[in-house]
Amino acid sequence: MRRHDFEPGKLVVGIVLLGGCLAYLAAVRGWWHFPSYLILPALAVGFCLAGLVSSLTYAVRRHRARGTDPVERGRVRG
């Protein structure tokens, strides 16, 4: 089985969702108080950040692939 590429955008989404869940659970348990209306904008900002990271990853991989041989990119099978 082929190894999967590392996708930092998915990592950022996971961290954002875990952070939102932990903040909500901390508020429910009474450990931390914050305005509940701030969770959704914070998640939206986190998702935008994940999209930016994914776009940058795509651009870097595309730029690096231009400099390689077509056989190495997997487009031409030999």
Image: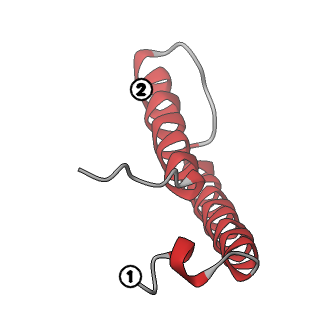
Q: Is residue 32 above or below residue 7?
A: above
Q: Quadrant of residue 55?
A: bottom right
Check the image and report above or below for 53 versus 23: below
Q: Which residue is mark 2?
A: 25
Three-letter amino acid code at the position of disc 1: Arg
Q: Which quarter of the picture shows residue 45?
A: bottom right
How crowded is the residue under tag 2: few (<14 C-alpha within 10 Å), some, or many (20+)?
A: few
Left or right of residue 31, residue 49 in this image: right
Residue at figure coordinates x 54%, y 40% from the top left: 15
Displayed quadrant of residue 77: bottom left
What amino acid is found at the position of numbered circle 2 in the picture?
Answer: Leu
Which secondary structure, mark 2?
A: helix
* Foreground label between 1 and 2: 1
Residue 54 x/y as whole percent: 61, 66
Identify which residue is drawn at 52% across, 78% down.
71
Which numbered dot is residue 77? 1
Name the residue at the front extreme: 78
* Front residue of this view, candidates 17 and 23: 17
67 vs 13, nearest the viewer: 67
